[in-house]
Amino acid sequence: MQQDISALRHTAAHILAQAVKRLYPTVKLAIGPAIEDGFYYDFETTTPFTPQDMEAIEKEMKKIVKQNLPLEHFTLSVDEALAYVDEQGEPFKRELLEGLTDAPSFYKQGEFVDLCAGPHMPKTGAVKAFKLQSVAGAYWRGDEKNAMLSRIYGTAFFTKDELAAHLERIEEAKKRDHRKLGKEMKLFAFMPEGPGFPFYLPKGLTLKNRLIDYWRKVHKKYGYQEISTPIMLIGDLWKRSGHYDNYRDDMYNSIIDEQEYFIKPMNCPGGMLTYGLDLHSYKEFPLRVAELGIVHRNELSGALHGMARARVFTQDDAHIFMTEDQLHDEIINIIKLYEDVYDAFGLHDFKFELSTRPEKSIGSDEAWEKATESLRNALDELGRPYVVNEGDGAFYGPKIDFHIKDCMGRSFQCGTIQCDMNLPERFDLTYIGPDGAKHRPVMIHRTCFGSIERFIGILTEHCAGWFPFWLTPVQIMVLPISERHHDAARKVYDELNAADLRVELDTRNEKIGFKIREAQLQKIPVMLIIGDKEVDENKVSVRSHANGDEGQQDLAVLIQKWKAESAI
């Protein structure tokens, strides 16, 4: 079925290209693959596509579908193929052909012919449920030094009901977009003075600090110590760690006393230096050292996406030092920690991905094989299904990635477990074994949230801004009905504040309905309404997001209940 949907979407991409060429014959064709949720095609055009163009293209696509053109496959020799694309005036197709030795594959539908390996549906009439969605810029072959192309995105399904459900999910995702909700809820901001650098507002910082409080509690339970290392370190250190050779383009640098320094994109080298300060014994192992390290990465401006892809973020890192014999059990320990954490946030659906050695890497084949088998065996023992992603490990070791699905079925990579038998060698890290001799430790790099910022973005969208009561920045809003109720409302506010509950008081000269709507927009889970009846009976009227109108209740009883629900 997955192959069929890919063929359907690939065919839709060809129909898109055919429609564009019919309407705009001078446009040049690049590539048009099927992707996870649809398809796209890249074009070189002298003027950008407009919304009116998109409507015309989609209308022409429907004509091509109605024509039910057969897709005919054929091959040409390389020379014949080059001559053909030159005749058609398609320079991007020529570039794709250059260097090929095997006979290139083509598909023809009506007057339209495209260089393509397939697969496709037998006829264009199979693509009945499709929708063009957006236009974006894209560099040819993903290289910013190449031509900027116009990329038209679309999606296609076998049935109109499937298409409608998908489009509905997209609209829901727009409503939940953390950038939109973060602005409405006054959590964080992005400004032109610092593209990609989030500004935390008071409520957003409260949210971040609550996440960190939880993080510290669970890591203490699992036996971690916490450290903090400098944000900037000398250039030679990054060359020793291998980051300079493998990550230089993403690192910010500065010159201090005629020496080059780099702002850290990762916490690893600082963790290595910290370990090396003392002589360690095998009796200390596994030595679990965690760090909430602020890191900076020089992301391309086009890749930035709110909190999900920022240039500065807090990485919830840890480096664990151990003997080789302890590696298997420690991996299992980390997996259980991660599952506990994700469960606490209602993220129960996640998958595991095992990534193996990339082409650009350091270390011996033997070390890589041992590390990879330890990760594989731990997943097998726990009975966790996983997929293998060949060649996508870190440059210093293989890894397990946790891919979490939110309530809309979207997948996000969060936690990672990376085995490393190489950096301990580069930093000459040792421990004293039971034989009294020095040995080399094995190390794991791992992050649970991935980054605090990214996790906030994921959680905001998963919860649609309605965070769990213990986590939400403002738990309770006190709403006096009129000015004569202000004193009673202030007393309620003071009692809640003294109980260390996060509460706000709205004394604006506005109608109570307006105040309630405002509190709902701010995603505040509980509202306490104070009017004549509440003042006379020394009660509060409770209105909650979970249950609606809950009637009058005793404040002291509510405080005890909410304090218990606020515990981490």
Image (tube, rainbow, N blue to C red):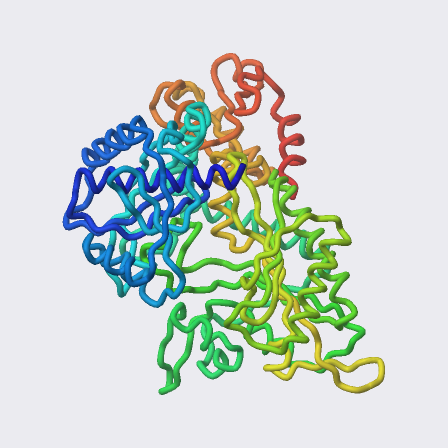
Q: Where is residue 24 in the image (x, y as percent from the top left)?
A: 16, 42
| Placement of 48 over or under 482, stated as above or below | below
Q: Which residue is drawn at 63% across and 81% down?
A: 425
Q: In which quarter of the image is residue 7?
A: top left
Q: Position of residue 208 (x, y in %)?
A: 51, 49
Q: Determine whether, in the image, residue 20 is placed left or right of residue 297.
A: left
Res 421 visible: yes
Closer-to-camera residue (19/500): 19
Q: Which residue is drawn at 58% across and 64% down?
A: 291
Q: Quadrant of residue 173?
A: top left
Quarter of the C terminus within the rendering:
top right
Q: Position of residue 543 (x, y in %)?
A: 52, 21
Quarter of the N terminus within the rendering:
top right
| Placement of 479 over or under 372, stated as above or below | above
Farthest residue in the right direction?
435
Q: Residue at x 37, y 82 (%)?
A: 256
| Placement of 25 over or under 549, stated as above or below | below
Closer-to-camera residue (349/137): 137
| Placement of 239 over or under 411, stated as above or below | below
- Total marks drawn? 0
Q: Determine whether, in the image, residue 384 is placed left or right of residue 522.
A: right
Q: In which quarter of the image is residue 483?
A: top left
Closer-to-camera residue (375/445): 375
